[in-house]
Amino acid sequence: MRTLDDLPKPDRNWLWKRRNWLSVPPLPADVLQAASAIEQTEKRLEALAGGRIVALEAEALASSVRDSWAVEGVELDPVAIRSSIVKRLGLDVPEWKAYAARRSAGEDIAVRATLDMLNGKTEVTLESILAVHGKLAPPASEAAWGRFRTSEEYVVKGFGDRREIVYVAPPPEDVPGLMRKYVRFWHESLPGIPRAAGAALAHLFLVVIHPFEDGNGRMGRLLADKCMARGQAGTFRPYSVSSVFRAHGQAYAARLDGLDRRDGVERFLRFALARHEEAARAAEARAEALAGLEGFFAAAPFLTDEQRHIVRVMAMDPGRKWICDDVVFDMEDDEAACAAWDDLVGRGYIRQGRLHLEAVPAPDRKPEQEEGAGGPEVR
């Protein structure tokens, strides 16, 4: 099998070869309008969430950690992630059940690095970027963490003899200077454009520089979330940039591959902003569901603790089509949990795997089954 050194290196007009590429490009009116619309959605989201903003931010934080590592092929335990977040931040999130026994080194490493970068007290500097990257290091990793690469770096796709290099990063001797320009760009250029456009560029330019042997995508996604948090009241985000990119991985890769086009950066911006808008609207729907929980529980005092837990978990992702096992996997009594799910289905609160809190029937009366929804709910 051919080694990486044997593979042909494509000679393309990489973005980093262009003069003054590390700067804000001309932004068309519709791009600025799309970025501004996201900020308006976020203002509505913050007002709607009210006292539930902590739950929104906690869930988004957990999603950010899980999805950012999943993009790199590393599957982390979602319960252990949530447990680590609760322990480190001292949060009271009724939607979560944190078990200290489920914490592990891998999840703690991921959560600690994420919190360190998103902490409102952490300024973006060369030193802070290197420090956070160093904390990303998984146990027994052979890569150099916490320092810039000193060798050529390529992006390769395919396996075995079908591998091919699809991106050549800047030479290693250029990396320190490019990262100094990146930090200046962060502080001098990003404040002048809408946050969503700035977050897309902050992510994109770090990935283009590819300053590390490993962890470039994770650092780029963290910095995008950091940029989105600029100017907001809290430190953390109500939805995750990592989740945006994970859900559209193939389209994301295609936009990166097209950066050598004259309109490549603009195409990436349009893609990123459209996905941001989708994520913001999904978070808005989550906030609406959470905002309705207090009134729902007041009108349905007959629900058990298990049923309240199921409803809270489903409200965190109201657009998802759930199955019983996905909701109750962290509950201690499987039999009681499944009975609680079945009763919620019978009352009409769960239909076709989705949460419905519009009406609260009396505790001794079950609503008629909705037309066309025959058959048992999938467990």
Image (cartoon, grey):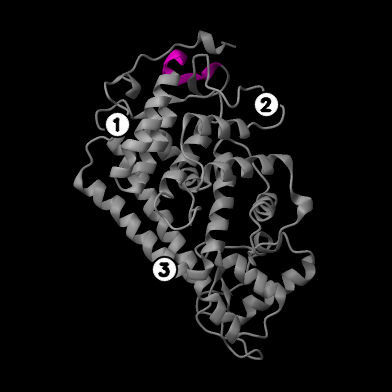
Q: Quadrant of the N terminus?
A: top right
Q: Nearer the viewer, residue 338 or 151?
A: 151
Q: Is residue 83 visible?
A: yes
Q: Quadrant of residue 87?
A: bottom right
Q: Residue at x 33, y 17 (%)?
A: 12
Q: Nearer the viewer, residue 301 or 8?
A: 301
Mark 2 or 1, nearer chain start: 1
- The answer for how far apart the CA atoms under marks 2 and 1 are is 34 Å
Question: Which element carries disc 3, helix, strand or loop?
Answer: helix
**Label 1 neighbourhood size at 10 Å, few (<14), some (14-19), many (20+)?**
some
Magenta part of the protein: which range? 161-174
Q: Where residue 126 sits in the image (x, y, percent)? A: 48, 29
Q: Is residue 352 visible?
A: no
Q: Residue at x 39, y 59 (%)?
A: 42
- The answer for how far apart the CA atoms under marks 3 and 2 are is 43 Å
Q: Where residue 104 sits in the image (x, y, percent)? A: 74, 44
The stretch drawn in magenta includes residue 163: yes
Compared to residue 199, the image places residue 185 above or below, namely above
The stretch drawn in magenta includes residue 182: no
Q: Report the disc number at residue 141.
A: 2
Q: Nearer the viewer, mark 2 or mark 1?
A: 1
Q: Report the disc number at residue 47.
A: 3
- Drawn side of residue 205 relative to residue 79, left or right: left
- Drawn side of residue 255 relative to residue 353, left or right: left
Kind of residue sitting beneath label 1: Ser
Q: Quadrant of the C terminus?
A: bottom right
Mark 1 or 3, nearer chain start: 1
Q: Nearer the viewer, residue 178 or 170?
A: 178
Pointer 3 and pointer 2: residues touching (CB < 8 Å)?
no
- The answer for how far apart the CA atoms under marks 1 and 3 are is 34 Å
**Which residue has dot 1 on it?**
23
Kind of residue sitting beneath label 2: Ser
